[in-house]
Amino acid sequence: MSKKIEFYFDFASPTAFLAFNRLQQLQEKYNADIEYKGVLLGGVFKSTGNTSPILLAPKGRYMAIDLPRFAKRYQVEMNFNPYFPLNTLPLMRGYYAAKELSMEMEYLKMVFDGMWVGKVDFSKPEALASVVKKLNINAEEFQALVNSDSIKDQLKDTTGELVKRGGYGVPTMYLGKDMFFGQDRLDFVEETLAA
């Protein structure tokens, strides 16, 4: 079995944050490769007729209890972002720009942590500008990439790819042809890696 994990994510998802952190642990333990695939969750929802679980009041209340359980299990600090939900289009395009500049992992960590640990209001352009500055990325070059058709197409194409593969939300992971949806399915991902 391949030890390559395809990880579809959007920074808007608290469960994708948990999965991102847990996958780092599994990567180290099983010497797995992770391919990060940023999508626009709103686009996935629109294409599949899905909606955010937080919009269903009973499920939202339950998630407020359940997510801290998983954060504790994974030994990950997590704080609910008071500005949630946020439009993550600039952040997701920014991911592909950072990837183009070979700053993929640094960007992933800083934005995920900003969103779900630091409670950053990423609806303000200066919040993303601060990430770019801290990573010592040239702001003009970054903005040119974010606004380029190439970056826009990468995000659009990867979002469509997830839907075509049967995905309907994030986090979604694939090991070969096997799909695993939700950070609460990472035990099955680990079983597959260990097999």
Image (spheres, grey):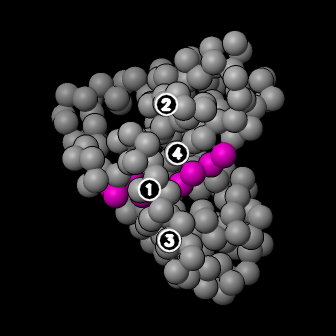
Tell me the kind of residue under disc 2: Met
- Residue 190: name its quadrant: top right
Query: Which one is in front, 108 or 113?
Result: 108
Tell me the kind of residue under disc 1: Thr
Q: Does residue 183 appear left or right of residue 30 in this picture?
A: left
Mark 3–mark 4 distance (CA, rounded to whole Å)? 16 Å
Q: Which residue is mark 3?
A: 153
- Judged from the image, the secondary structure of the residue bearing numbered disc 3 is helix
Q: Which residue is mark 1?
A: 159
Q: Which residue is mark 2?
A: 179
Q: Position of residue 154 (x, y in %)?
A: 54, 66
Tell me the kind of residue under disc 3: Asp
Pointer 1 with pointer 3, Cβ within 8 A? no
Query: Which one is in front, 100 or 80?
Result: 100
Q: Nearer the viewer, mark 3 or mark 4?
A: 3
Query: Which one is in front, 179 or 121?
Result: 179
Numbered range of the magenta stretch: 35-43
